[in-house]
Amino acid sequence: MKNRKENLPIRVMVFEGGCSGTSLGMALDEQKQDDQVFEENGLTFVINQDLFNEIQPITVDYIETPHGTGFKLSSGFVSAGGGCGSCSSCG
């Protein structure tokens, strides 16, 4: 099972609700027939084609801050989660 997860692409998705309302997130997931696929620096990202059409352009950055490291997603359509992954402040 471990090897199977290591080969899964990273899905970019929208989460509804939470502290900040609608936000972008990522998770390991199977590629689906209606996905747009992108490869960057050896990583494979997938996103539903309809969602991609709504929220593009999307930028995925890897950030390092005094509070931790992680991915930061940016889109003009929805707010994006930072590296801490929680509703409370990162400090």
Image (cartoon, rainbow, N blue to C red):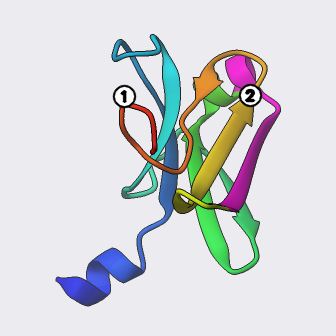
- Observer-nearest of 66 and 22: 66
Q: CA distance from mark 1 to mark 2?
A: 19 Å
In the rendered image, the quadrant that contains the C terminus is top left
User: In the rendering, at what x and y percent does residue 60 appear?
Assistant: 71, 51
- The residue tagged 1 is 87
* Residue type indicated by callout 2: Ser
The picture places residue 64, in percent across and down from the top left corner, at 66, 64
Q: Quadrant of the N terminus?
A: bottom left
Q: Is residue 58 magenta?
A: yes
- Outermost residue on the right side: it is 57
Choose between 86 and 7: the one closer to the eye: 86
Residue wearing tag 2: 75
**Segment tinted magenta in the rendering:** 53-64
Q: Residue furthest bottom?
A: 3
Circle 2 SS class: strand
**Which tag is nearer the camera, tag 1 or tag 2?**
1
Residue 14, relative to residue 21: is it above or below?
A: below
Determine the residue positioned at 44% across, 34% down: 89
Residue 75 sits in which quadrant?
top right
* Earlier residue among tags 1 and 2: 2
Q: Amino acid at mark 1?
A: Cys
Seen in the picture, residue 83 relative to 55 is either above or below; the reply is below
Furthest toward the front, the residue is 91
User: Measuring 31% from the left and 75% from the top, which residue is drawn there?
Assistant: 5
> Helix or strand or loop: what does disc 1 sit on?
loop
